[in-house]
Image (cartoon, rainbow, N blue to C red):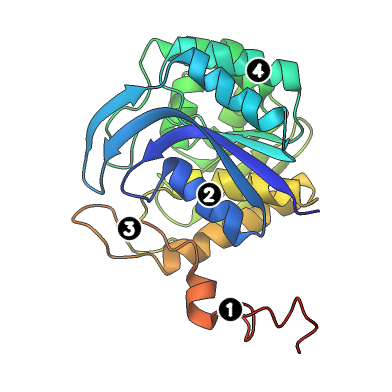
Amino acid sequence: MMKRALSIAGSDCSGGAGIQADLKTFSAHGVYGMSVIVSVVAENTGRVIGIQDVSPDMIGKQIDAVFEDIGADAVKVGMLSTPECMEEIARKLKYYHPANIVIDPVMYAKNGCPLMEPAAVKTLIRTIIPLAGVLTPNIPEAEKIAGGRIKSVEDMEEAAKAIHAMGCGAVVVKGGHASGNAVDVLFDGKELCHFETARIDTKNTHGTGCTFSSAVASQLAIGMDLRQAVQKAKDYVTMAIVHSLDIGKGHGPTHHFWHLYQYGLREGQYCGKERNGGK
């Protein structure tokens, strides 16, 4: 049976981040994607125009709809803007107890606009972080959660350890906001592991955090172990950045389907030949 992944996050009408990026990433990995929309975000590559939050009751009903019928092999949690939203999602995740929960603590859009109420960070630490099998903060988010400045890989390691102590299974502190090569630091409670690639010279990085976390969730859903999942997710998001799209006037999106666009579908895939034995 095809593996299933659920994204619980905000909607990005410009298509580069949030739910839209997650569903593209799930599809690129051959995973069946589903969504629970927690906020409708009017944004584009340059700015966030407005945010309208979905009621906690409706968020809970969306989660019920997925789990009472289809279920999920992995859950990715992204933008959660309010404490009430966090409390409802935590309650539902504890009730359904899904495997492979990947949480991306989204606090800012790529252009720096806030996507989480400042007062919600304490609720995030108290209710959401302990539910994470994997937490994937970038450097500004890790600073906010751990409460210290990060200026080196060693600081990233210390932040990962401090955040892990808050109750999550593993932490990946992403190094995209640092200088030099792009180094991500994984701490699983026992070992530290680095994942390094050359930095790509492009402004078109809208949605990279969403894409990375949903790629990790996809890899875990199809059975990869944690270290493999992080490595393959980093390879995937690096590919998507290398082939990023110069769309919009600000930070353009990454290219989730570059391989498909480059090489296309196999001959006969749309006309039933494969289903009928190629006849």
- Whether residue 174 is situated above or below residue 196 in the rendered picture: above
The answer to which of marks 4 and 1 sits earlier in the sequence is 4
91 sits to left or right of 112 = right
135 sits to left or right of 124 = right
Residue type highlighted by circle 4: Lys
Residue at image location 40% in from the left, 44% down from the top: 177
Disc 2: which residue: 23
Marks 3 and 4 sit apart, C-alpha to C-alpha, by: 35 Å
Residue 278 in view (yes/no): yes
Horizontal and vertical percent for residue 73?
Answer: 75, 40
Disc 1: which residue: 265
Front residue of 173/62: it is 62
Marks 4 and 1 sit apart, C-alpha to C-alpha, by: 38 Å
Q: In which quarter of the image is residue 120?
A: top left
Of helix, strand and loop, which one carries label 2?
Answer: helix
Horizontal and vertical percent for residue 14?
Answer: 31, 48
Front residue of 69/63: it is 69
The answer to which of marks 3 and 4 sits earlier in the sequence is 4
Residue at image location 72% in from the left, 38% down from the top: 70
Q: Residue 92 carries which label?
A: 4
Marks 1 and 3 sit apart, C-alpha to C-alpha, by: 26 Å
Marks 1 and 2 sit apart, C-alpha to C-alpha, by: 19 Å
Farthest residue, direction bottom: 279
